[in-house]
Image (cartoon, rainbow, N blue to C red):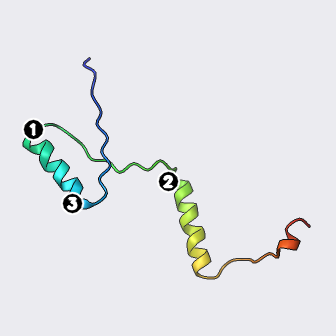
Amino acid sequence: MKAQNVLIAHPTNANELSVIKAFFEALKIKFEVTEKSPYDIEFVAKIQESRQQAKEGKTVKIALDDIWK
C-alpha cells in the first residue's frame, strides 16, 4: 500500500477556496474538501441551544453573594 501525503489548507473565504480548487484541478491532482470541526457535534448543539435560550431571556440571574450559599 502506498503512503498518502496530506495537505491541509485554511482558506479564509470562499474565493480562496475556489482558487485552491482550480489550482488542483488544473494540475489534475485528486483532492477532497471537508469541513470537520474540532468540536463534538453534540457539544456544539448544546452551546447553540444555550445561546438561543439567552437571547430569549430564559436565564436565571444569581447574585455574586448567593453563589457560595
Marks 1 & 2, CB-CB < 8 Å contact: no
Res 55 quadrant in image: bottom right
Farthest-out residue, bottom: 57
| Residue type at tag 2 | Ile
- Residue in the foreground of this view, choosing between 17 and 4: 17
| Residue type at tag 1 | Lys
Residue 54 position in % (x across, y down): 61, 76
Residue under numbered circle 3: 15
Residue under numbered circle 2: 41
Q: What SS does tag 1 mark?
A: loop
* Left or right: 49 as drawn, with respect to 17: right
| Residue type at tag 3 | Asn
The N terminus: image quadrant: top left
Residue under numbered circle 1: 28
Q: What SS does tag 2 mark?
A: helix
Q: CA distance from mark 1 to mark 2?
A: 34 Å
Q: What SS does tag 3 mark?
A: helix
The C terminus: image quadrant: bottom right
Q: Which one is earlier in the sequence, the residue at label 3 or at label 2? A: 3
Res 15 quadrant in image: bottom left
Residue 41 position in % (x across, y down): 50, 53
Residue at horizontal 27 percent and vertical 28 percent from the top:
5
